[in-house]
Structures are given as C-alpha cells and as structure tokens.
Image: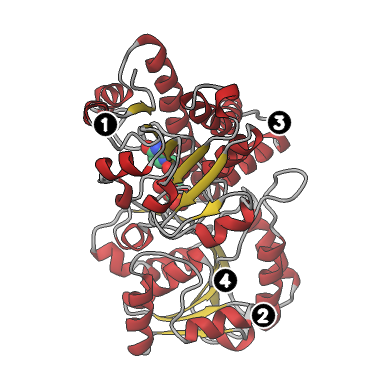
C-alpha cells in the first residue's frame, strides 16, 4: 500500500519510517528542501534513538523516500497523512492550523486518485470537518474520506510507542475511511494492538483529553511532593502506594520540576481554548497549567535556597546537569531548565551547564549560561550542582570527584535519581523533590 506523509518533522518522520518498516511504500514530504536533502543523505533533523538506522534500512529496501513535490508524491497514495506542525498561535494560545489547512488545499488541488486524508497532527475538535470542507470546495472529483488518527508517541521512545502502541485511535465517519485505515494498520492489528474506531470529533478530543489527564497526574504528584516535604513524608513511597491501586496506575507519578516538551504545554492550552469557545470550562486543566507554570520558577528558588537564600546566592555558581525537558531528546521546548536558568540569573547566580544532546538548541534560549564539554567541567568550582534532567549519564556520577571539583558539596536533585542516604553519606548537603 502506498502512503504519503506530508510533514517530515518529528511525528511525520517517525510514523513514515515505521509504516515503511511494516512493509508499506512510504514517501515523506516536506516543504523545506534543505531538510529533504539532509534526509536523503541520511542526516536526521531531530535526535530520536534508533531513527537513523530505521530510516537507513527502509531507504535501502526501497520502501521509504523523500520529496518536496507534494502533487507528484501523493500520486497513487491510498492514505495521505497530514503531519505538519500545529504550534500555539501567538497571542491567544489556540492551535495554529494554517499549515494543516494549506496542506488540505494543496491536496484538493492535486489529488488524482481515491484516497483517505488522515490528520496525524494534533488538531482541535472540528478540524477534520474543516479539512473536509476545504477538499469539497476544491471541486476534486476523486472519492475521499477525512479521518483523524492522533499519535501518542513519547520523544525518546517514539519508535517503540509506534510499533507497540497501547491503542490505535481512528476517528472515521464512513466505511471507506475505516477500510483504508484497517489496511494501513493491519501489521499492528496482527500484533494484537487494540484499534479503536470512534467518530472524528471523539478521536480529536481523545488526544487532548489523554495529554491533559497525564499532565494532571504529573501536576497532582508534584503538589503532593511539596506537601510531603512539609509533613515529613516521602513522595516516592506515596507514588508507589497509590500507584499500586489499578484504578490509579503506577505510571506518570514521578514528581519533578514540572512537565515540559512539545505536547503537554501546548495541548493543555489549546484544550482550554476549545473549552472556552464551547462555553464548557475545564477548570481542572486550567489549574494544572497554572500550577505547572509557577512550579518551574519555584524550582529555581529551590536551588537558590540550597545556596543559602537570595543574599548568599548572589555571585555564586551553579552547575546545571541536563537541560532538555526529558532525557533522550534534544528538545528544549518548554523545558523547566529555561525557567530555572532565568530565575538563577535574576538572582545574580552564574550558571554552567552540560546536556548530552540539548546544548546547541539550548544556548540561544539561555545566552547567559556557560555550556560545558562534560558534567565534570560544569561542576568545577560550583557552589551547588542541580540535576534538572534525568539523563542516564547523571545517574552514577563519581561523587568523590564531584566533591573534589565543586567548591561546596551541595546537590539539588530535581529528578530524585539519588538516594538521600548515599549522597549524604558521601558528605553532601542533598535536596530533592518531596523527600523530607
Ligand atoms: C507526551 C505524551 O506522553 C505522548 O503520548 C504525546 O503524544 C506527546 O506528549 P512527550 O512530551 O514526549 O510525550 O514526553 P513524556 O514522556 O510524556 O513527558 C512529558 C513531560 O512530563 C516531561 O517533561 C517529563 O519529564 C514529565 N514527566 C513525565 C514527569 O515529570 N513525571 C512523570 O512521571 C512523567
């Protein structure tokens, strides 16, 4: 089956490569000629474990190709996925759908066979209806159906998530759409991945509801962590204790510096806007957004406190380990590290940092931060070390060496990757999240 993937960003590229790996004939399309040229040379525009090898093997097998020419690339495709960006619109936080609609117009103008048009981009409820209107208005005489098929890929684990999904959600309004999507996902079907057919609007909302729920879960445990610190409880034990209840579930209960990334911040905001437009307020999500926002800067204050408070902190140096919003990605979007670095700068603290993948993207976002070659270089002369992202490389630091290099043995572990007893036994002052 031939599949066209319009948009070769994170979602489009991972999905396209995985579909090709299932045996489909896939062409990934992008407007950016430089990106396509690089992909043809085997250079990935993003860091995602395993993606380069997957792309390489499928290109070699002749199942995956790249193009900037949408009209000819979509020829004979039975399914055309729209996987372009839907960033938060400047000014009001609504999802910006201009890229999605521009692609729909281009498809309408050039479609030369019957096809299913699938929105893979995260789009607000009703976007599928608008895409359908655009296609109808184009006067194209081929049979088409517009289907919603949200992605649930986690950065850093995207290939595994695609190949072994908890579920596949398809929002289709007619039999033609359902049939083609069944064919697209047949390989996963055989893998016994559940496929859920719903109507298009439900499918669009499922994506936002899932992300908002997960963001709520994280924010809830983060607030519990603050309470744990006040009452002398341990948030990891509390997480375990509630997570063992199947109705709650153990995942996404790790307290930390607040969620970031390309999805949760943007999607929670867009959901608030949709709810507002339909006069159906989602106050829980509203609170989640606010609590998470203020938490990031509060983490900066936590580091300042570890330096002895605002007066003592001025002129001191902090080593920040980890900048990306989570490990195994170079994505800096809405990373708590940005707010933490700003809070430290405002307090007159110098920051040296190391991140295994994110420094190039991080540098313009935090121009005052001194990017280092290694964790130990950042730690040299630091008055406190702050672990901001839980990269594996930071899980087993040589604490003796850290103590020798740093000016003062102070460790602020915003991801709880160390055991307080071990770190204190090594002679450190240790602060973590939700562990008194
Ligand atoms: C998320 C969703 O998981 C995915 O299904 C969706 O399609 C896109 O958004 P992603 O943004 O890649 O994926 O990262 P995820 O692993 O979900 O983490 C998001 C943020 O929450 C990170 O900042 C992470 O550090 C934080 N987090 C996650 C916690 O603080 N605690 C947790 O227990 C889990």
Residue 47 relative to residue 111: left or right: left
Residue 398 relative to residue 43: left or right: left
- Whether the residue carrying mark 4 lies under 8 Å from ligand 1 is answered with no
Residue identifier under label 1? 423
Residue 436 relative to residue 366: left or right: left
Going from N to C along the chain, the mark reached first, 1 or 3, is 3
Residue identifier under label 2? 141
Q: Secondary structure at mark 4?
A: loop
Which mark is drawn over residue 7?
4
Q: How dense is the environment of label 2, judged by Cα within 10 Å: few (below 14), some, or many (20 and up)?
A: few
Residue occupying the far top of the picture: 231
Tell us which disc is closer to us: 4 or 2.
4
Residue identifier under label 3? 279
Q: Which of these two is toward me, 35 or 231?
A: 231
- Distance from the alpha carbon under mark 1 to that under mark 3: 51 Å
* Residue 324 shows up from this direction: no
Q: Are marks 4 and 2 in contact (CB under 8 Å)?
A: no
* Residue 330 shows up from this direction: yes
14 w.r.t. 397: above or below: below
Q: Secondary structure at mark 2?
A: loop
Q: How dense is the environment of label 4, judged by Cα within 10 Å: few (below 14), some, or many (20 and up)?
A: many
Going from N to C along the chain, the mark reached first, 3 or 4, is 4
**Whole-percent x, y for residue 163 in the image:** 31, 63
* Residue that appears at 71% across and 72% down: 105
Q: How many marks?
A: 4
**Whole-percent x, y for residue 103 in the image:** 66, 71
**Whole-percent x, y for residue 364 in the image:** 63, 57
110 w.r.t. 178: above or below: below
Quadrant hosting residue 419: top left
Quadrant observed for ligand 1 in the rendered image: top left
**Whole-percent x, y for residue 219 in the image:** 47, 29
Locate the C terminus and report the quarter of the image it occupies.
top left
């Amino acid at each position: 089956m031939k599949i066209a993937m319009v948009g070769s960003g994170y979602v489009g590229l991972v999905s396209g490569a995985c579909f090709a790996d299932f045996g489909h004939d896939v062409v990934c399309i992008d407007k950016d000629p430089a990106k396509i040229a690089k992909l043809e040379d085997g250079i990935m525009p993003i860091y995602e474990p395993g993606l380069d090898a997957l792309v390489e093997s499928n290109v070699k097998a002749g199942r995956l190709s790249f193009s900037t020419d949408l009209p000819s690339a979509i020829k004979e495709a039975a399914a055309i996925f729209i996987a372009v960006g839907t960033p938060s619109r400047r000014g009001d936080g609504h999802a910006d759908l201009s890229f999605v609609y521009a692609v729909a117009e281009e498809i309408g103008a050039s479609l030369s066979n019957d096809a299913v048009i699938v929105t893979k981009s995260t789009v607000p409820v009703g976007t599928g209806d608008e895409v359908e209107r655009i296609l109808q208005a184009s006067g194209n005489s081929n049979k088409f159906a517009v289907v919603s098929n949200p992605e649930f890929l986690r950065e850093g684990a995207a290939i595994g998530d695609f190949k072994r999904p908890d579920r596949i959600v398809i929002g289709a309004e007619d039999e033609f759409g359902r049939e083609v999507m069944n064919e697209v996902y047949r390989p996963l079907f055989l893998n016994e991945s559940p496929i859920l057919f719903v109507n298009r609007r439900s499918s669009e909302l499922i994506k936002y509801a899932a992300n908002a729920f997960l963001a709520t879960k994280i924010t809830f445990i983060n607030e519990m962590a603050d309470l744990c610190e006040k009452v002398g409880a341990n948030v990891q034990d509390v997480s375990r204790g509630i997570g063992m209840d199947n109705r709650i579930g153990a995942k996404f209960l790790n307290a930390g510096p607040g969620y970031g990334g390309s999805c949760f911040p943007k999607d929670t905001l867009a959901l608030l806007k949709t709810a507002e437009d339909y006069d159906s307020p989602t106050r829980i999500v509203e609170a989640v957004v606010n609590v998470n926002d203020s938490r990031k800067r509060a983490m900066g204050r936590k580091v300042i406190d570890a330096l002895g408070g605002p007066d003592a902190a001025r002129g001191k140096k902090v080593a920040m380990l980890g900048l990306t919003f989570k490990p195994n990605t170079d994505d800096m979007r809405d990373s708590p590290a940005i707010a933490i670095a700003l809070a430290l700068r405002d307090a007159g603290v110098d920051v040296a940092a190391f991140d295994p993948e994110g420094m190039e993207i991080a540098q313009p976002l935090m121009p005052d931060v001194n990017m280092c070659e290694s964790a130990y270089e950042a730690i040299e002369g630091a008055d406190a070390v702050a672990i901001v992202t839980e990269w594996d490389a930071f899980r087993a630091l040589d604490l003796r060496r850290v103590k020798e290099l740093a000016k003062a043995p102070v460790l602020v572990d915003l991801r709880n990757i160390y055991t307080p007893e071990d770190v204190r036994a090594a002679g450190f002052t240790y602060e973590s999240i939700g562990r008194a």
